[in-house]
Amino acid sequence: MERDLKSRADRAARAFSLVEVVLALGIISFVLLTVMALMSTGLGTMRLAMDDTKESQITRQLTGQILLTPFSQLGTTFSGKTYFYDDEGSFLTNTPMSAPATTRYWATTTVTNSAYPGATVSAISSSLVDIQLQIISAPSATAKSQTTNIFNIEVPNSGS
């Protein structure tokens, strides 16, 4: 009998009480909720960073095309044009109506003659063109999740 009481006392000393278990579960749940909230914020930030990276790739690609185009053909080649890209930043040859699920970015170009205070318009327009590049991210999404970035590219006449 004495041995039986001793073993029960040993087991009771080694076991956790209900209060300790509830307290431990409370701490663990608080930590898990905090981690889940941080993961949500981190994933949103990562998505924005990915969008910025893709938009800079699209801008770099279009800037390269613009700089390789002869100066005299810039207006006809890029004025009022819209280009479509998928979620990887790859150029799509179709319109968003034929493949709306794959279109993630729209890039629209507008060509204008540069104007600077104190300069004559004819001298500037024959040697410098301003191309505005507007990139819309998630064009088919709601207006809240849609982002628009505008870049201006000044292209000088290099004699071509």
Image (tube, helix red, strand yellow):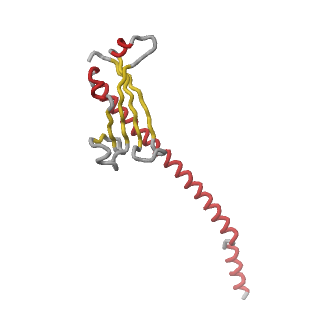
Left or right: residue 110 versus residue 43 is left
What residue appears at the point 37 percent right and 41 percent down from the top-left corner?
A: 105
Relative vertical location of residue 58 with respect to residue 41 in this rendering, above or below: above
Depth check: give the residue in front, 10 or 124.
124
Tell me where residue 17 sits by quadrant. Answer: bottom right
What residue appears at the point 35 percent right and 41 percent down from the top-left corner?
A: 89
Relative vertical location of residue 101 with respect to residue 78 in this rendering, above or below: below
How far across and down, in percent of the image, does residue 137 sit?
A: 41, 41
What residue appears at the point 63 percent right and 65 percent down from the top-left corner?
A: 25
Q: Quadrant location of the N terminus?
A: bottom right
Tell me where residue 150 sits by quadrant. Answer: top left
Relative vertical location of residue 6 with respect to residue 117 in this rendering, above or below: below
How far across and down, in percent of the image, does residue 157 sit?
A: 31, 17
Q: Quadrant location of the C terminus?
A: top left
Q: Residue furthest bottom?
A: 1
Q: How many marks?
A: 0
What residue appears at the point 27 percent right and 41 percent down from the top-left corner?
A: 93
Depth check: give the residue in front, 41 or 71.
71
Depth check: give the residue in front, 150 or 28.
150
Left or right: residue 149 versus residue 156 is right
How far across and down, in percent of the image, does residue 136 sit?
A: 41, 39
Tell me where residue 21 sits by quadrant. Answer: bottom right
